[in-house]
Image (tube, coloured by chain):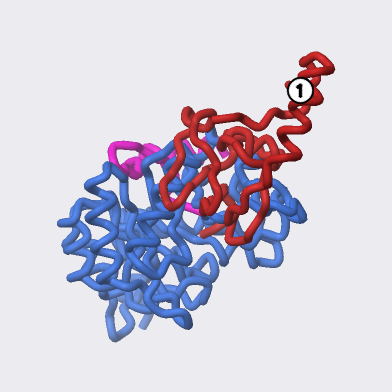
Amino acid sequence: MRRWKKPRVVQKYSAVTQVVEVMNEANQEPVTITLNGEQRGVPAGLTIRDLLAHLNLHERLVVVERNKEIVRRNEYGEVPVTAGDMIELVHFVGGG
Amino acid sequence: MAVVTKKLDQLDEPLEIAGRRFRSRLILGTGKYKDNETMVKAITASGTEIVTVAVRRVDLDRTKEEGILYHLDQEKWLLLPNTAGCYTAEDAIRYARLGREAGFTDWVKLEVIGDQDTLLPDVEGLLEAARTLVAEGFKVLAYTNEDLVTALKLEDAGVATVMPLASPIGSGLGLLNPFNVRLIKSRVGVPVIVDAGVGTASDACVTMEQGVDGILMNTAIAEADDPVRMALAMKHATEAGRLAYLAGRMPRREQAVPSSPTAGMLD
């Protein structure tokens, strides 16, 4: 599976590679997932780790549920985000 | 303050839940505070060692502030995730699992609500969820009606504590059924912690005087005009009620008995 490259990773590549990366990204349609109850388009080929980074969320403060199954923290780098996924991102809030 | 605390240690035993010992018999919720700073101050003033938290969606638009973990030091307080807002066993189990993952703890305050207006527990769902969660290794603190038979069934299911309500959640009506709460305490072996309904310090005191092991409260402190003062009042009231229970009260009489000698009066 092709991974979506974060910009800082892309910057390390040569100019030619960068162009290829950008073209690939442009050609790949974003996939639609249901994220916390709302439909959202995200880049194709993300892992859970990429998704959290994409959303600027700290891994340790969030719990991820994918299609009603909890994703363990040590699997964030492997579990893919695929079209149609129902993903819930939860954390602790005040409560009695 | 240190002197008072030391004395209390000698006069009472620690509260033990699922093998963990606590000096405070008060558990606090963290909901409804006007800001996190007040919440932390109130929690600190209360002397509690356990605070409850809820599991909710992250706000992806970032209009609200960060999760509560930023403000609660897990070294100081045991975080007790709740399943508030769950109306089925299935939902409660789902939330409990998420809470375990978020808080690195297998303790859960189990609520399965049966009615929107009163927020009274759904006993059927509660028992079902309790059995499943106990089997999964959770330490279940079960919020329940002040009903003996349910309490006994929960104990059979293996819960760590039974938590009968004083009155409905957020009502502040105080302890409505002291007889049933005493009955539960007299028959159940696991700790009995009264959860919900306490409105002010006297309610906490009366509740502890029934001989229960502790109290869980949220709104009474969070909605007080001065939550920090009320938290301190609740600490004292909980300790006072506990000590009064341990001391053993005088009998109630339907007539007066003089406190001064009747002999030796002048002619």
Relative to A10, does residue A80 appear above or below in the rendering? Answer: below
Q: Give the image quarter of residue B1.
A: top right
What's the magenta region?
B1-28
The chain painted blue is: B
The chain painted red is: A
Which residue is at 77% across, 33% downward?
A: A23
Which residue is at 45% across, 51% downward?
A: A67
Relative to B154, does residue B253 appear above or below in the rendering? Answer: below
Secondary structure state at the residue bearing disc 1: helix
B184 and B108: which is toward the camera: B108
Give the chain letter at badge 1.
A
Which residue is at 51% across, 76% downward?
A: B171
Decide whether residue B231 is among the magenta residues: no
Q: Position of residue B144 (x, y in %)?
A: 32, 67
Q: Position of residue A18 (x, y in %)?
A: 79, 22
Q: Which residue position is annotated with label 1?
A: A10
B42 and A82: which is toward the camera: A82
* Position of residue B196 in the picture relative to residue B136 (left or right): right
Decide whether residue B3 is among the magenta residues: yes
Q: Position of residue A79 (x, y in %)?
A: 49, 35
B179 and B239: which is toward the camera: B179
Label 1 crowding class (10 Å Cα cut-off): few <14, some 14-19, many 20+? some
| Numbered label tally | 1
Which residue is at 36% across, 63% downward?
A: B143
* Position of residue A50 in the picture relative to residue B97 (left or right): right
Seen as rendered, the residue at the extreme right is A15
Q: Amino acid at mark 1?
A: Val
Determine if residue B251 is in view: no
Rendered-image quadrant of the C terminus of chain B: bottom left
Q: Position of residue B25 (x, y in %)?
A: 41, 50
B170 and B207: which is toward the camera: B170
